[in-house]
Image: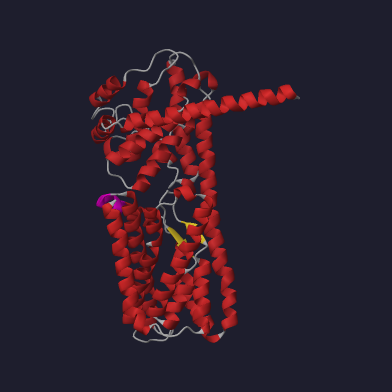
Amino acid sequence: MRREILVYLGMWALGLAAAWHVWPEVGAFTLPAALLAVGAFMALFKRVRLSSQDYFAYYSLDDVPLYALLFLFGTPLTVLVALLAKLAYESVELARALQRHPERVTPLLVLYRFSNAPALALSWYAGGQMYAWINAGSPLLETGRNLLALLTAALVFFLVAFLLNGLLVNSRRQGSLTEFWNDLRQDLNQVRVQVLMLAPLGALLALFVTFEPLAALLLVVPVYLMHVALDARYKLVREAQNTIQAMAQYLDERDHYTAGHSQRVSGYAAQVARELSLSSQEVDRVRRAGLIHDIGKIDIPDAVLRKPGALTQDERAIMRTHTDRAAELGKKLVALKQDLPFYEAAYHHETYDGLGSVFGLKGEQIPLLARILAVVDAYDAMTSDRPYRSGMATEEAVERLVRSRGSQHDPRVVDAFVRAFRSGAIAGVKREWEREENERKRFAARSETLLSMAAGSC
């Protein structure tokens, strides 16, 4: 917590220092500058998430009027407007949070959210200084020097903004330096090409404001449509994810003995991923892969999937086809591969030595995500009850995993699992699932009682 507070205070110190440095050159607000400032504040309420994580990168439409401010009035006014607009926006959001969920608002959370204001000011300060240095007074979009300055300023602003945002998020999560760089790389991977159009649109807005102010309204249409397209894509991906995960949950519920299997595998896999020092985005991706790793079983007949005894050789061959079906699903749903990695999850039955592989992969050829799933899937299978046997003790299951190092499973992943097991993280996942399952059963029982009472009163 001490490091977190120091990062926030350091961000404020640097942001205020940048504002103080440019303050003597701010000058007076003109009508175009005031309108662009109001536009920057209003546009902050139009945000699109660039990832599906709990701590996520996003873009907002305020970049367009702020770019226009930079090109027309220079760095000082842009830094001031960015700082004040963000502070005003966070104040509105804080008021909303206090009204809706006051119990969730903590001093550290408020400090974290408001620290985005100096971070934004610093990003515009860096981009603006670069623009002024390269441009050297060249007219907007009239020389090659100005075009180079525009592109360089946008790149610097973009990189500094992502760097500072990553620093704030990493501090909030108490992450390591490795996690910081991994998270930054993952956030950059989420960027869509439409976001890179914000700087050129800002330049066009600046030209319209200069020569035909009323024509600037025409830019509202393409900017808003770009926002709608990105927002629709994100919502479509989220809805598809929810649908697939609901299918995975239904699949678990088809068989009483495998109920909760995917949830537990998902939780175990996330703990192992953390032991391997993967980024928070990669941990979350592994977690989602655990939820869908058996999605291919949706086509397996109940006679095989729910058979109370051991499977015959032919039935095992039918069961093995679920990985093929998952791989085929991954090929069809290409747009979801980043968030729902069907194809990689389908490899969770590959053996590390390649002797029992389904797809003919071995060793490092098998995606790390699949190697993690292979270990935790085996652990949950060994420790779960079946109609024809009781689940084995957890210590015995761990011993078997250790003996499988280098043959069936990746030694590094097994070692990470053992560390997670010894620390109590694996048992914690099981306890959390049991708590949620008991809560679900109590809710179902109450609902059934209420329905019976309602039916009796009719």
Residue 157, quarter of the rendered image: bottom left
- Judging from the image, the colouring scheme is secondary structure
Predominant secondary structure in magenta? helix
Residue 180 painted magenta:
yes
Q: Nearer the viewer, residue 419 or 10?
A: 10
Q: Position of residue 9 (x, y in %)?
A: 30, 62
Q: Residue 450, position in %: x, y?
A: 64, 26
Residue appearing at x 42%, y 59% in the figure: 191
Counting labels gives 0
Residue reaching furthest to the right: 458
Visible residue check, residue 89 = yes
The image position of residue 170, as x and y in percent, is 32, 53
Image quadrant where one finds the C terminus: top right
Is residue 51 toward the left or the right of residue 214 in the image? Answer: left
Residue 141 magenta-highlighted: no
Q: Residue at x 37, y 57 (%)?
A: 112
User: Does residue 261 show up?
Assistant: no
Q: Quadrant of residue 433?
A: top left
Which span of residues is magenta-colored?
A: 176-182
Residue 178 pos. (x, y %): 26, 50
Above or below, comparing residue 347 to residue 401 in the picture: below
Above/below status of 138 relative to 359: below
